[in-house]
Image (cartoon, rainbow, N blue to C red):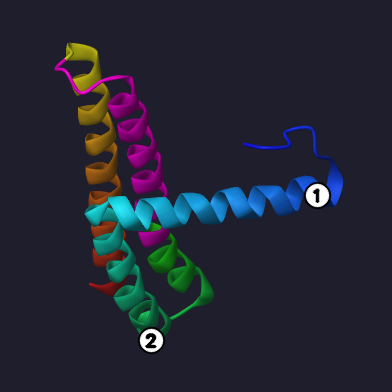
C-alpha cells in the first residue's frame, strides 16, 4: 500500500485502486468467488423481475451481495494463512474452516431470503 499518508480525494482514489486490485486478485485466484459472481449475475435480473417491491428487490439482491462480501473476507483470511506457511497447523486450519463456515452461512441466508420472498 503505497502512499498511506495521502489525504482527501487522493486517499479516496488510492482506495478505489486498491479495491479494484482486490477484486481482480480474488477473481483470478478464487473459483468460489467466480461462481458466486455468476450467481449474482443470474439472480440480479431475477430479483428485479420477481421482487414485488423495492424492499423485496433489495433483500433479494442484498442477500447475494452478502455472499460476495463474505467470500471476499474468507479469501483474505485464506491468503494471509497461506502467506504465513503451507505446513499444517491447527490454528491455520481452524481459521480457514471458520471462513468457510461463514460463506456457507451466508449462502444459507441467501437461500432462506429467496425462499421466504418467493414462496
Furthest residue in direction bottom, as rendered: 49
Question: For the residue labelled by badge 2, is the local secondary structure a helix, a strand or a loop?
Answer: helix
Q: Which residue is mark 1?
A: 10
Q: Which residue is depicted at the point 40% across and 51% down?
A: 25
Q: Which mark is first along the chain, 1 or 2?
A: 1
**Residue situated in front as seen by the camera: 111 or 2:** 2
Q: Name the disc covering residue 104, or none.
A: none
Report if residue 46 is visible in the image: yes
Where, by quadrant of the figure, is residue 68 drawn? bottom left
Furthest residue in direction left, as rendered: 88
Query: Residue 53, position in %: x, y?
Result: 48, 78
Q: Which residue is depicted at the point 32% across and 20% down?
A: 84
Query: Residue 107, position in %: x, y?
Result: 25, 52
Q: Quadrant of the N terminus?
A: top right
* Horizontal relation, residue 16 to residue 64: left or right: right
- Mark 1 is surrounded, within 10 Å at the Cα level, by few (under 14), some (14 to 19) or many (20 or more) other residues, namely few
Where, by quadrant of the figure, is residue 92 drawn? top left
**Residue situated in front as seen by the camera: 107 or 25:** 25
Q: Real-space Cα distance between discs 2 and 1?
A: 39 Å
Residue 98 within the magenta-colored segment of the rendering: no
Question: For the residue labelled by badge 1, is the local secondary structure a helix, a strand or a loop?
Answer: helix
Residue 86 within the magenta-colored segment of the rendering: yes
Please determine whether, in this image, residue 47 is positioned above or below residue 39: below
Furthest residue in direction top, as rendered: 90
Q: Which residues are magenta?
A: 64-88
Q: Quadrant of the C terminus?
A: bottom left
Query: Residue 72, position in %: x, y?
Result: 39, 46
Q: Name the disc covering residue 49, or none.
A: 2
The kind of secondary structure the magenta stretch mainly shows is helix
Please determine whether, in this image, residue 106 is positioned above or below residue 38: above
Amino acid at each position: 500500500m503505497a502512499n498511506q499518508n495521502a489525504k482527501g480525494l487522493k486517499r479516496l482514489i488510492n482506495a478505489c485502486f486498491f479495491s479494484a486490485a482486490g477484486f481482480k486478485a480474488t477473481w483470478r485466484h478464487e473459483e468460489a468467488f467466480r461462481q458466486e459472481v455468476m450467481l449474482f449475475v443470474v439472480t440480479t435480473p431475477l430479483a428485479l423481475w420477481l421482487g414485488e417491491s423495492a424492499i423485496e428487490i433489495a433483500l433479494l439482491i442484498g442477500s447475494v451481495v452478502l455472499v460476495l462480501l463474505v467470500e471476499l473476507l474468507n479469501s483474505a483470511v485464506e491468503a494471509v494463512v497461506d502467506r504465513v506457511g503451507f505446513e499444517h497447523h491447527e490454528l491455520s486450519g481452524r481459521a480457514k474452516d471458520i471462513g468457510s463456515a461463514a460463506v456457507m452461512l451466508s449462502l444459507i441466508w441467501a437461500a432462506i431470503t429467496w425462499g421466504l420472498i418467493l414462496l
